[in-house]
Amino acid sequence: MSRQRHTTATTTSHLVCQGDRRSMEMSGALLRPRFLLLLAAVFWVAVLYFRLSVLVRGVAVAPMERTVSFAPGYEGRSDDDDGNIDPCRGRRVYIHDLPPRFNADILSRCGSTDGRWPSMCEQVSNAGLGKPLPELLEGEGEGEAALSGAGGWYATQQFALDAIFHGRMLRYGCLTNDSSEAAAVFVPFYAGFDFARHHWGYDNATRDAASLDLESWLVSRPEWRRAGGRDHFLVAGRTAWDFRRDTCLSPTWGTNLLLLPAAKNMTVLVVESSAPGLGNDMAVPYPTYFHPRTDDDVLRWQKKIKSAERPWLMSFVGAPRPGDPRSIRSQIIAQCGASSACRQLGCAFGASQCHSPGDIMRLFQSSTFCLQPPGDSYTRRSAFDAMVAGCVPVFFHPASAYLQYRWHLPGDHARYSVFIPEDGVRAGNVSIEETLRRIPGTVVRRMQEEVIRLVPRLVYADPRYSLDTVKDAFDVAVEGVIEKVAADMRKVETDRRSSWPDNIWAE
Ligand SMILES: *[C@@H]1O[C@H](CO)[C@@H](O)[C@H](O)[C@H]1NC(C)=O
Ligand SMILES: *[C@@H]1O[C@H](CO)[C@@H](O)[C@H](O)[C@H]1NC(C)=O
Ligand SMILES: *[C@@H]1O[C@H](CO)[C@@H](O)[C@H](O)[C@H]1NC(C)=O
Ligand SMILES: *[C@@H]1O[C@H](CO)[C@@H](O)[C@H](O)[C@H]1NC(C)=O
């Protein structure tokens, strides 16, 4: 039904887009209540965790600071006789040479979709970046920081991370062919694309086939035996909910990848994690439309958004969720519509404004605050588009960002964002505009500076080029993985030691 519409949409022509997801849910009478139950459960886990994280903040080092300060030399000195430091020490990654059925074949068959959903070919083109944005129309500004393919801008699909990350990994500076010296093992399985190709109209067995195949391939490798897969990681560029069918939305949603014993031992990067502490999945940023090729691309862009004029106090891009009583989208849309300081791009059925990357980015660049209420799930790609435009995100639920992306966003969320609890918005007693107007100008400017400072670590560089000194979202993620794997491995070691006495008694 609504799928046809998305074939023509330029940007977020999602493999599964929000409209599809909603109609899928509404087509099964049982689905909606289950989804609500799930939301409620996750909400409470989130609330508990949130409180807890506040409690432990005094002793814990913010993960971001840790990753930023991870530098050559940190691991020790005198790596060779001349006292030179090996910059790759402790950071080497081995890439599993998977058979092409787990990655390349999925891409090359992007067009054979049995007519069940649109071809994925455009989205996976250009190393996963999608189509370059068209060159500028007259009067749209000029220069290399412009929103065009030449400036590094693409109509990137929000679930295209599998391919982008793999491409970046292949150019990682510390690859090794000797798995025994690797700090981590990368598994280039395109789990997100695998979800998409078998989601609509296929049975459970077909959906799970590639995941099971992968599991049996992995566990028979010598690399697996070293630590039962604790040092392995893969990227599944969708939300964790898409890979937990048994525990998730409905018996008709997704694969069971994350519930396989092998996957539970690995670190799995997703764009929205299931719940803190629930699994081994870690959230990393959604891909945005910006894919710089050089350090200069990033610096030029930061300079541009720093001096951007922002005539709108706030803006919103998104569709309402009429079938979901928990959603505050309609309240947001109503408040925005009633304010002369707010601008929105409609993307209800029929309107396609919100699918044009250029329109979205131009709006966010001319707004001080960007409203980011939950949609079908808690997180939104739009939050990253907003920050890349230098717009301060306004969140309404802690799981939309603060409980995710712990490697990429500062632990102190007041530094870069505004939080307005959704209950007040839903009850209609909180004015978003008044809340934002009460924030002093100096505080707003400090938040803007922080958001602009974060931009490099929120974008994925073009995988066909290499940045020089700038660390992008990929670099930050790999550092996070390596630290997490090291911690997991220490735990494996401790567990092994603590089981010695049992072994002795058993003998
Ligand atoms: C690993 O082996 C391949 C094939 O022999 C070679 O092309 C590549 O350069 C090697 N990579 C490293 C990091 O040694
Ligand atoms: C598919 O799996 C789900 C749980 O993962 C189960 O509830 C459902 O009954 C299965 N469908 C079929 C047709 O077996
Ligand atoms: C997962 O790791 C544990 C040790 O932490 C190991 O006992 C188990 O066999 C591993 N699972 C698989 C599927 O290898
Ligand atoms: C607004 O309503 C919510 C829910 O009824 C309530 O928890 C909150 O205290 C109210 N806030 C104000 C400012 O009145």
Image: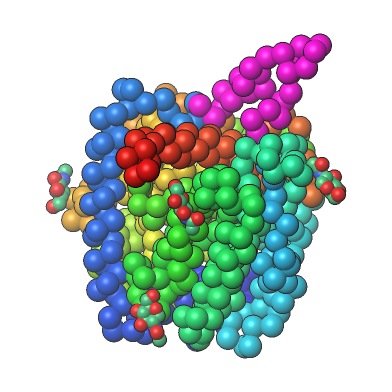
Residue located farthest toward the top when viewing the structure as drawn: 82
Evaluate whether residue 77 shows in this view: yes
**Residue 473 magenta-drawn?**
no
Magenta span includes 81: yes
Q: How many marks?
A: 0
- The picture places residue 44, in percent across and down from the top left corner, at 23, 52
Front residue of 372/457: it is 457
Residue 269 picture location, percent across and down: 53, 51
The answer to whether residue 445 shows anywhere in this view is: no
290 in relation to 487, above or below: below
As drawn, is 354 to the left or to the right of 460?
left
Q: Which of 5 and 353 is in front in this view?
A: 5
Residue 4: quadrant of the picture: bottom right
Q: Which residue is drawn at 29% across and 75% down?
A: 32
Range drawn in magenta: 66-91
Quadrant in which the C terminus appears: top left
Quadrant of the image occupied by residue 452: top right
| Residue found at x 72% / y 52% | 167
165 versus 405 height, above or below: below
Instruction: Please say if 211 is above or below 154.
Output: below
x, y percent for residue 320: 37, 67
Residue drawn at (33%, 57%) of the image: 332
Q: What scheme was used to colour the molecule?
A: rainbow
Q: Nearer the viewer, residue 254 or 396?
A: 254
Residue 267 spot, x, y in % from top left: 51, 49
436 with respect to 218 (left or right): left
Magenta stretch: dominant secondary structure? loop
Q: Residue at x 34, y 44 (%)?
A: 506
Q: Nearer the viewer, residue 249 or 423?
A: 249
